[in-house]
Image: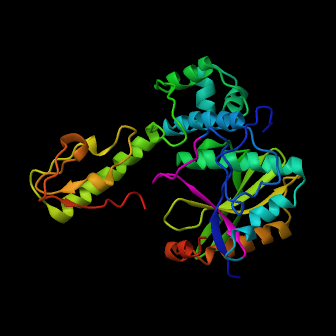
Amino acid sequence: MTTSTALVATNQLQAEDDIFSHLQPISAFDVKKDYIATQLAALMSFCEKSRSDMAEGLGWEKSRITRILSGENNLTIKTIWEFSSYLGFDYDVVFHSADQRRPQQPWQIERREIVFSQFWNTLNQEINLPGILVTQAAYDITGNLLTENIRVGTTIEYEAKTNETASSFTPIQIPIGR
Amino acid sequence: MSIYFTRLRVESPAPLKELEDWPGCWKVYTICANQSKNSSTTRKDVREMEVADAEKARSAYGNLLNRAYTGRPLETLYDEKQCHVVHKFDFNGSLFKIYRLRAGDIRVYFCYPPLGNKNIVLLKTQPKRNDNLSKGEKRELEGIARSVLQYSNLKDFMSRVI
């Protein structure tokens, strides 16, 4: 990575964690370029497409796919659009500060649904209560699972949806993907 | 040989957001010779490099951490030339694989400990202009991997994380 647009690092690591303290600060823009390319690679992976599939489908040289996914190029909006729309996905530009959660990506959402499904099956086996209600409101606005808000009773509700705090419900923790 | 593990970290310059763990992400560890993070073998590898190579190594680690964060199978995020198996050996009756990540002249060797968790352990990083590994180099990597595998039980592994 070049350091042409290097910014002063404020998210500094503790000295013992920073094995690169003897180097010039890394460029935030270069890190972001790689991050964006990584998201495209992950979307491709999520859609079970190979680089060859993408090249063939988009009518591009495979070397172009390699360059796009290398993280070294300044990708255009059009390139990202062509890539993502070919895979059947729209994209937005969502701004957030360093202390806000990132929006969830499709592969993270799929993961939470698998995790939730596992939890749900386990719950059914262990408790076997009729009339259990599960909603996806267990996730906050950025898609993160609100484990602390899940309650088990004759119904399962989430405070995020119902704003209910029934005392007969028992809070539980979900073993998420460990 | 008793070893410890610590998470690999690369600084995120402001205003970038740090990569925060989520349940499906890969977690990348480096090996430490003792209970000090300063004893990280990755630190030693990097400090022994020339500055230009160390910068490439930092880029390769950042690239790896970004990809690890997605939680997707790493081999689907790199092409075969960039990330591939370089050595296999028998461990408890099955073949254990050591992988190599190529980033320019930098080679990062790593493995997936059989922990039932999404962990990656870096074994060695070095500038290398020649892709062929000698028998001695394979033996060295295997030795490092075996030192990791003595903690192949997740509880044992986590007890060594500093």
Q: Give how far across and how far down residue B43 sits, in percent.
A: 77, 62
**Residue B123 quadrant:** bottom right
Tell me where residue A140 appears, x and y as whole percent. Answer: 34, 42
Q: Determine the image quadrant of residue B138.
A: bottom right
In this rendered view, identify the residue nearer to me: A117 or A15.
Answer: A15
Out of B81 and B7, give the one closest to the viewer: B7
- Left of B144 or right of it: where is B25? left
| In this picture, residue A54 sits left or right of residue A70 | left
Q: Quadrant of the N terminus of chain B?
A: bottom right
Give the main secondary structure, helix, strand or loop, of the magenta stretch. loop
Residue occupying the point 72% across, 45% down:
B82
The colour mode here is rainbow
Total marks shown come to 0
Residue found at the far bottom of this picture: B1
Left or right side of A108 for B39: right
Quick check: can you spot residue A49? no
Q: Which residues are magenta?
A: B17-33
In front: B107, or B30? B30
Could you tell me residue B22's position as x and y percent?
47, 51
Residue depicted at x 27% and y 42% = A136
Does residue B65 appear anywhere in the picture?
yes
Q: Is residue B19 magenta?
A: yes
Q: Is residue B126 left or right of residue B112?
A: right
Residue reaching furthest top? A78
* Residue at 75% from the left image edge and 55% from the top image edge: B108
Question: Residue A166: within the magenta?
Answer: no
Quadrant holding the C terminus of chain B: bottom right
Looking at the image, is A55 positioned above or below residue B59? above
Where residue B87 appears, as percent x and y from the top left, is 73, 63
